[in-house]
Amino acid sequence: MTIASLLGLGLAGMMAVLIIGVGLWARNPERSKMLGLRPVDAFNDLPQKAGESIEGGTRIHVSLGAGAVGTETTTGALAGITVLESIADAATISDKPPVVTAGDGAAAMLAQETLRRAYERQNAAERYDHLSGRMAGPTPLSFTVGAMTTLKDENVSTSLLIGSFGNEVALMADAGWGENAHQIIGTDNAQAQAAAYVTADETLLGEDVYASGAYLLGGKPFHRASLHAQDVARLLIIAALFIGALLKLVGII
Amino acid sequence: MKLRLSLAVPVAVVSGVVTLLAFFIRVEPLTTVFPVLLQWAATLAAIALLAGIVNLMSVHIRKVSAFSAGWAYSAVLVIAFVFVIFMWLLGYAAAFAPDEPTRADVIKLSQESLNVAFQFVQTPVEASLSALLVVVMVLAGARLIRARRHWSAVLFILVSLFLLVSLAPLGPLSFAQGLRDLLIQPLAMGAARGILLGIALGAVATGLRVIIGVDHPYGD
């Protein structure tokens, strides 16, 4: 076992312990409030924009990106699923249920399952349409074109592109702009975040992409805890970088 | 539902923990179990892809049959899909040809048709879309100032314009190289690394929540 492996495992283990420990502690709503969150405009506006879409009889589009479950982009798709979960209950009472696009069969199935559960919770399982969660295309560009078509044809007024997107997300955003849709983009690709910043109404930068569960869904305790675990891990990494640079400077390493 | 979940959560947690440990620790029996789990995952991913393609076709067939908005494009997609699958299967069907020249002709026809579809349809269309991206980005940059009246939007546009102009082969602007290097190297690279660190930690935390079983996107 190398030192790098040991450090990696140690960091993951520490984060897991913090998520479980702080999450269990924060299950009490009073304590949960003590875990402060900085304001993120995209999350503050999302419930209102989703509500406007539902009341206006238009559709909410959620896209999980071109990432595939089982690859390094899995967590991007899971971030999109969390956002879908947060709006699904409210959106399923609308005449126009939400439509979800994914670039992978497994991600599309996860989206279908999330929507199906939302309909079941609303005692409206018979209204569930399994084609509301769909694979738009198997490659990044074919997925982009498929999602653009969905934006144009499905009377979308709010588009949430949260997942794994490359620079081609700008094309999707442009299609949404043409439909006058309010767009929030969050991607796990740093370069595409710049493209999203230019084209979206609101952009989720850095780790904000993964933070939706802490802000939406009534602020789930384990999601809030994971934000604090990230902060602790970040501080440790910054300290390690700083000490490493200092040791290099004085010639010890 | 409860029974299904009571099985799914332990299976997901054990598989996740074993895979995570095997990634870092190379000891038996982890080294034996790790590739087996990966093979299962690959098989499941292939089945999910097939399900995804059936789902994709179902969406478009429904659009065509209902003549809903954009049905003509869906019709083109369905026809192209059937054509490509047919030509691909034709290559395998060549094994049943009565003689060798016919077999060779059928295989050639299959391969050339697939080449035409990928080389002269899919590749140029994807390349055109990539080119279109540049135009879209320029237009979006112009719209940004109007849409987002914030100092950060102004700074974004000014820096982008400066970098574009300073990268152009214009002699009088060579003085700008120092400022450009300052913007690209310590400032932009430093910020990008910070963002990447945040994304990586966010991805780890999201994965860990699934591995330890507090998040289960596969069921309530």
Image (cartoon, rainbow, N blue to C red):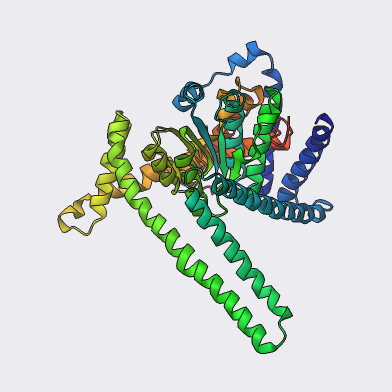
Farthest top residue in view? A30
Number of numbered discs on residues: 0
Residue A251 visible in the displayed image: no
Residue A88: x and y in percent read 60, 28
Q: Residue at coordinates 36% horizontally, 53% vertically from top-left? A: B132
Quadrant housing residue B89: bottom right
Hey, which quadrant is residue A28 in on the image? top right
**Residue A206 image position (x, y, % from top left):** 49, 37
Q: Nearer the viewer, residue B148 or B125?
A: B125
Residue depicted at x 64% and y 23%? A220
- Which is more toward the observer, A157 or B206? A157
The answer to whether residue A150 is left or right of residue B110 is left
Left or right relative to B11: residue B168: left
Q: Residue at x 57, y 53 (%)?
A: A138
Question: Residue A95 location in percent, x, y?
Answer: 56, 27
B117 is higher (above) or lower (below) than A72: below
Q: Is residue A177 visible?
A: yes
Q: Is residue B195 left or right of residue B172?
A: right
Residue at the far left in the pictured view: B172
Where residue B109 appears, as percent x and y from the top left, is: 58, 78
